[in-house]
Image (spheres, rainbow, N blue to C red):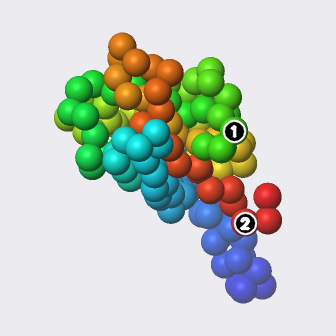
């Protein structure tokens, strides 16, 4: 009887504890040069409390502000309309919080991260990287 009471007390304690959000492991996306730009980048996507933070660092870029977006599709076949705009790269860096966007939705949604040449030359792509899908999805 004591064992049953102890088990019931333990179950009640567990149910009374607040739920904590479990952060998914960060996902790293490597962006490769396009159009002979020589620019590469690393984007780190980290989910916290249902939001995804996208941190990007570039190498070999032009140094001027560069628009950067998450697009539907792949680098080989990109939908030109941005799906999630990211903070414009300044000095080769950008950090954006996508509120209410889970990391899993980005990994299951056939998305790519794309860097444009400049704010005055948006049609020219300078670097791109596909967000890897979750295995088995």
Q: In the current view of this chain or complex, which residue is farthest to the front?
A: 36
- The residue indicated by pointer 1 is 77
- Nearer to me, 54 or 79: 79
Q: Residue at 66% across / 78% down in the picture?
A: 6
Based on the displayed image, in which of its 4 quarters is residue 97 positioned?
top left
Q: Residue at 26% across / 46% down in the picture?
A: 60
As drawn, 111 above or below 40: above
- The residue indicated by pointer 2 is 135
Compared across the picture, whether 24 is left or right of 119 comes to: right
Q: Residue at 46% across / 27% down in the picture?
A: 124
User: Which mark identifies residue 126?
Assistant: none
Q: Quadrant for the C terminus, please.
A: bottom right
Q: Quadrant for the N terminus, please.
A: bottom right
As drawn, 34 above or below 62: below
Where does the image place residue 61, in percent across and percent down from the top left? 28, 40
Distance from Cα at disc 1 to Cα at disc 2? 21 Å
- Nearer to me, 42 or 50: 42
The answer to whether residue 29 is visible is: yes
Dot 1 or dot 2, earlier in sequence: 1
């Amino acid at each position: 009887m004591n064992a049953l009471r102890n088990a019931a007390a333990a179950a009640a304690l567990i149910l009374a504890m607040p739920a904590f959000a479990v952060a998914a492991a960060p996902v790293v996306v490597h962006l490769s040069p396009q159009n002979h730009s020589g620019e590469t980048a690393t984007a780190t996507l980290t989910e916290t409390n249902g939001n995804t933070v996208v941190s990007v660092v570039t190498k070999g870029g032009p140094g001027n502000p560069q628009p950067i977006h998450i697009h539907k599709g792949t680098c080989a076949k990109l939908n030109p309309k941005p799906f999630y705009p990211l903070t414009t790269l300044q000095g080769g860096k950008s950090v954006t919080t996508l509120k209410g966007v889970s990391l899993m939705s980005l990994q299951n949604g056939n998305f790519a991260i794309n860097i444009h040449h400049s704010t005055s030359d948006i049609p020219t792509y300078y670097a791109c990287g596909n967000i890897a899908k979750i295995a088995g999805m």
